[in-house]
Structure formats: structure tokens, C-alpha cells
Amino acid sequence: MTVYTIDPLTDARWETLLFRHRRASVFHTRGWLSALQESYGYRPVVFTTSGPDEPLENGIVFCAVRSWITGQRLVSLPFSDHCEPLTSSPAEHVEILAHVCGQVGPAPFKYVEIRPLSVADAEELAAVHLAQSKQLCLHVLSLDPSAEELFRGLHKNCIQRKVRRAEKEGLGCQRGRSETMLRDFYDLLIQTRRRHRLPPQPLTWFRHLIAAFGEQLTICVASKDNRPVAAILTLSFKRTITYKYGCSADGFSRLGGTPYLFWKTIQEAKEGGMAQLDLGISELDNVGLITFKDRLGARRIPLTRFCFPRSRTRRALEGGIRRLAGKLLHRLPAPFLTAAGRILYRHFG
């Protein structure tokens, strides 16, 4: 088979494939890819066995990440929780991945990374020498049960009780994507990322997402006496709503703002005919986050990332940079913290 490359931002066949293929997610969409390109300069490319004059039958999308800190690489996809190969047979899968791995060498790319949702194709990955690089877990909540059943599925003490506390406290819930709401969200994000000893994503990233997704992006902000105390950002594609970012104010967790927003999101998604809520990935050592998602009644799914060639040195370097940055960043004033995010994020996609 011959492998071709196409630009998913300009080739109309890509969107046709997305709406037809059952594995397609919000991370395959033009909106997500264009935001990556506009914000970080990552160039998206799709590898396919379909010729230029044929209907697009398959494709695996990557971004070319160029960094003098973490190296030149092809990633499917940066800052994406998962990105399935949109293929229909093992032969297609192997042929495309073998071609992509063939791009690795002295120049320009040092390695390839893929982030599939399923490891069902492990034999195909082994055939092209892709090795496991990281273990994570994903949580997905089915919205098929009734709203009453979904509420009963929430942990009684840790989620239901906090939702009721938020309602008793009179928390307001506002939805939208205005500049004012974005600013409220971003102020909370700075506080949250500082607590986690991480820089916030650049503000321009969220502006590009809003411009690209429009009504498919929603910012939900919970407020107490007009003061924002918690916020989440979700994206919608087909019948899946994807939770991507969440944040909260320092010292206000007792109000139950975050559980309240998740419950309101579940309710509205259910009413809107959505089939599932994708709660995103968690690092295996982040026990608190995993437990919180478990308590929402979501199903936990093991997730594995793969790369070629395998490199412990690269992973150690990236981990070392993050640990060093973490020791410094939580002491920085907000303007310097956001500046660090603008500088560093493009290197870690």
C-alpha cells in the first residue's frame, strides 16, 4: 500500500471521515487541530492509504512538534487525552504506522508517540516496534440511565451531599463563552495550577478554542455572592461531551462548587440527548482525582501511550524539567506564572 499525507485543515474529506467513523472524537476535529496550530505552531498532518482523488477511507492524524528542549517529534495528538487511529483493518493500521515510524531518524523527527483509546491493536503496534511509554486511566460516564439513577450513582457523602450543600448556599451557575466568563475561568485556573505547582495554559489557547468550537464549547462558572468559586470547560462532538479543564478558588472547596458543576453538566447533557460524558485522563499517582471521578459513577478504563523508539532518557528529561519548574513556579506572581505557561507549553505537547 502507498501512504499519502493530507492537511486535515484544508482537505474536505477529513470532516466527512470524522462524522462517518465510530472512533472519531473531539480531538480529531478541525477545531481542536486549528487551535493547536494557532496556539503552539504545531502542524497537523494525516497519513492515509487513500489516494488524492479517492474518498478518504482511513487516516491517522499527527502534529509535528518542534522543540529545542524536548526534541522534534510526531505526536497523535498533543494535549489530547486520546486519539484513535481511524482505520478499518489491521493491514491499514500497520501500513500507516510503519510509514510514520519510518520518518524517525537523524532528521527531522526523533520519535513518534501515539495515544490510542484502546490497546486492542497491541499486535499491530508490536509489529512496527511501538513500545509502551506511559500508563494512565480514563473515566467515562454513560448518560443512558435516567437523571434520578445518575444522581443515585453519585457517591452519597462526597458528591450528593456537596451538591445539596451548593444548592443550600445558593451557588449560581452561569454558562457561556464570553470574554468575561473566560476571564473568570482563567483567574480560577491560575489559582488551581499554582496549587498543583504547574503553570496555566496560555490564555490565547482558550481564546483559540472558543473561536474554533463556538457553541460546541461551554464554560460553566459557579459563583457565591457574584464571586466565582469553581469553573469547568467542556467540548461537544457528536453525542459525547468531553470535560477538558476544571479549576476552583483557593479556600472555597467547602461550598461544593466543583461537584455542583459536574452534576449540572450531567443534567444538561442528559437533557440535550448526549450519550456519554468523557471525564478525561488521570495520572495513576493522582489518587485524589481518580477517586473523585470514580465517585461520579464513571467507568474507569486503562489507557496506554506508545512511542517509537523507546527512550527512558527523554522521559527522565521531561520529568526532571517538570519537577524543577514545579519547585519554582508556585512562588511566582501571577504575571510571571502566566508568562512561564506561554513559554513552556509549546515544548510539552
Image: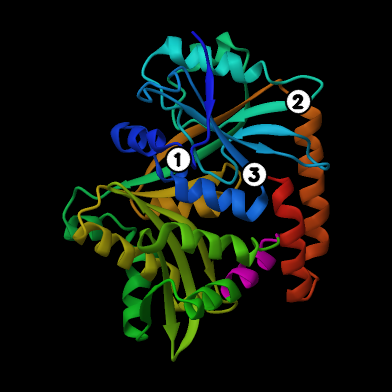
Residue 79 tag number? none
Tell me where the magenta segment starts and ends, as one range.
188-198
Q: Callout 3: helix, strand or loop?
A: loop
Q: In the rendered structure, which amino acid carries the disc numbered 3? A: Tyr
Mark 2 crowd level (few <14, some 14–19, many ≥20, 10 Å Cα): few
Q: How is the image coloured?
A: rainbow
Q: Nearer the viewer, residue 52 or 83?
A: 52
**324 lies above or below 92:** below
**Which of the two labelled residues, at mark 2 and mark 1, occupies the earlier sequence position?**
1
Q: Position of residue 218 (x, y in %)?
A: 40, 65
Tags 1 and 3 touching, CB below 8 Å: no
The residue that appears at 78% across and 76% down in the rendered structure is: 333
Choose mark 2 or mark 1, whichever is in front. Answer: 1
Q: Is 124 placed left or right of 14 in the picture?
A: right
Q: Which residue is mark 1?
A: 28
Q: Secondary structure at mark 1?
A: helix
Depth check, front residue: 244 or 312: 244
User: How far across and how far down the image is residue 97, in percent?
Assistant: 56, 18
Residue for point 61% across, 20% down: 100
Q: Which mark is residue 311?
A: 2
Q: Residue 64 appears in which quarter of the rendering?
A: top right
Q: Amino acid at mark 2?
A: Ser
Q: CA distance from mark 2 to mark 3?
A: 22 Å
- Where is 260 relative to 245, above or below? below
Residue furthest to the bottom: 225
Where is residue 321? Give x, y as percent: 81, 47
Q: Nearer the viewer, mark 2 or mark 3?
A: 3
Give the SS element for disc 2: loop
Q: Quadrant of residue 256?
A: bottom left
Q: Would you say residue 141 sits in the magenta stretch?
A: no
Q: Position of residue 213 (x, y in %)?
A: 42, 57
